[in-house]
Structures are given as C-alpha cells and as structure tokens.
Amino acid sequence: MTTPDRPRRNFYGRVHGKTLKPAQRDYLEQDLAALSPGAVGWDVNPDRRPLDLAARFGARDIWLEIGFGGGEHMVHMARTYPDIAIIGAEPFINGVAMLLGKIRRAGVTNLAVHPGDARDLMDVLPPASVARAFLLYPDPWPKQRHHRRRFVTQDHLVPLARVLQPGAEFRVATDIPDYVRQTLAEVPKAGFDLERRGPEPWSDWISTRYEQKALREGRPPHYLTFRRRA
C-alpha cells in the first residue's frame, strides 16, 4: 500500500542552537518517543494517517500550543488543567529538550510533543479535534520581505482552522505591533472572530521568558483572543 508523503515546504526557523547539555540529551533519548502525539515515535506517523487522539488521550479536550519555546506556559497549563491534554509543536530542539526537563520536574502526564513544523502535525490532526490553540510570542520575522514567513498567514491559519472545533479559542500574544497588525488582518480571513484585544493577559496566564525579555527591552505585550466561527 502506498502512503502519502509530507508536502514539500520551506522552513526558515532555527532547528538547533547551542550544544545540548548531557542531561538534555538524556531527556531527548529517554522521554521524547513516549510523548509523541500519536504514540508511534517522535516522528509524527510516517504513513500520514490521522492521529487517533481518543486512543492517545481518552475523552479529554485537546489543546494545541504552536511554538512552545522553553515550555513554561505548556507545563503551567498542564498543571492548571489536569483534565485536558496539550500537544505542543516546536522545531527548535533545544526548546524541546528544555520542555522535557520541565515535564520531568513537574511530573505532569497530560502532554504530548511534536518536535517539528506545526504544519506537519496539523496535517494529521483530525478535523475539529482541537478545543483551544495558543500562539505565544512567535518569531516576529521583522523585515517586511520576511512577513510571509510569519505564522499568521493563510498557509498556516487555514490548516489551524481546519483542526479547531467550531467555537474553539485561539490565543495570540506578541510584543511586536506589526505582528498585531498582520494578525488582525489575516486571522479573521481564515474563519475567526476577534473576541478580545488588550494589554492585560488572560487570567490563567504565566509570563514566559520571551515576555520577560520584551518587558526588559521596553516592548509592551499585546494579547488577542479569537473564536473559531461555527
């Protein structure tokens, strides 16, 4: 039987950073495979079949974090909401290793990790399977010629809309005013309504290292909440 290949896609972000510490290499070798969203190893299933989320997580609601950075928000949410399951996608392997260390220390079990492009993960998530999504301090790609690389383009937002349930919440946080502009212009085109926009974070928010860096450098955060249209 033939199986579909991954679509050919350009990927522009970093995948590797500083040399991993021995403990971080251990996390990747010992923990990552068991945390796959499809429980078939860290490389989201090679035959590209839709993931069986009920088999992996039971009847829990599924949340998705796109680009989890060092993982502090993801682990905070897993601890705050133990009855839901959170899948995180992050191609930067150093960030993945940081998250795995936080998971060990926190002892949370309602998490899954895709160490790669979120689009590859969304390809195999069933339609309307995700109840909430987060895009927190994404790569700003500040040069105008690079704006098409931002997540808030239709190439990313249409697949996201496909996997979100009607009425699902989509949270965006950024410290870049032009990213806010593009978010407000593009997200509604993909089937979302703006529900909330302002300088105050959500009530269950935990400030991340990226936000702390922005505040130190004098860039105020922006928080936006969208709702997937029915």
Image: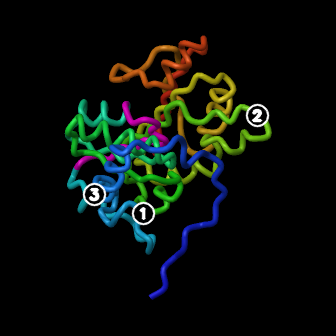
Q: Which mark is residue 90?
A: none
Residue placed under numbered mark 3 in the picture: 34
Figure coloring: rainbow
Taking the view exactly as shown, the residue that stands out farthest to the bottom is 1
Instruction: Between residue 30 and residue 23, name the one nearer to us.
Output: 23
Farthest residue toward the front? 22
Residue at x 53% of width, y 19% of height: 213
- Residue 230 is situated, as x and y percent measured from the top left of the image, at 45, 45
How many marks can you see?
3
Residue 153 on image: x %, y %: 65, 44
Could you give the CA–CA distance between mark 1 and mark 2, rounded to whole angstroms?
A: 32 Å
Element at label 2: loop
User: In what element is the residue under mark 3?
Assistant: helix
In the image, 106: left or right of 170? left
Q: Point out the stretch of residues depicted in magenta.
A: 60-72
- Residue 50 spot, x, y in % from top left: 40, 66
Report crowding for label 1: few under 14, some 14 to 19, many 20 or more residues within 10 A (C-alpha).
some
Please name the residue that numbered disc 2 is placed on: 143
Which residue carries the number 1 mark?
43
Question: On the rendered image, what quadrant is the N terminus found in?
Answer: bottom left
